[in-house]
Image (tube, rainbow, N blue to C red):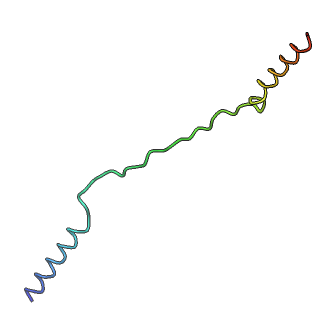
Amino acid sequence: MKKFALAAAIAASATSALAGSYETAEPVAEPIVVVEEAPASSSYGGILIPLLLIAVVAAAASTD
């Protein structure tokens, strides 16, 4: 009976000793990535310069 009580006491102390962890590391969160969109350009941005160039060439051709 003493051996059974001793085995029960050892088993009980072993389970309570292994139940928790002594490591107190804080959880590490991943950095938040913020993606900013490029500012919207006007729809005339790509065609404005060629139209001005054609207008200047047409004005120069009409004066001759």
Depth order, front residue of 62/29: 62
Considering depth in this image, is 64 or 43 the residue closer to the camera?
A: 64
Q: Answer with the quarter of the image where residue 13 lies.
A: bottom left
Quadrant housing residue 7? bottom left
* Above or below: residue 9 compared with residue 20: below
The C terminus is located in which quarter? top right
Residue 4 at x, y percent in the picture: 12, 86
Q: Is residue 22 above or below residue 60?
A: below
Vertical side of 21 occupied by 44: above or below: above
Q: Residue at x 25, y 61 (%)?
A: 21
> Seen from this angle, which residue lies furthest left?
2
The picture quadrant where one finds residue 23 is bottom left
Residue 34, percent from left and from top: 53, 41
Q: Is residue 12 left or right of residue 24?
A: left
Q: Residue at x 9, y 89 (%)?
A: 1
Q: Residue furthest top?
A: 64
Q: How far from the left and from the top, in percent, is residue 18?
A: 22, 68
**Residue 43 percent coordinates (x, y):** 77, 33
Where 58 sits versus 6, above or below? Answer: above
Is residue 38 shown left or right of residue 7? right
Which residue is more in the foreground, 11 or 49?
49
Q: Residue at x 33, y 50 (%)?
A: 26
Residue at the farthest bottom position: 1
Residue at image position (74%, 29%) is 45
Q: How many marks?
A: 0
> Which one is in front, 36 or 19?
36
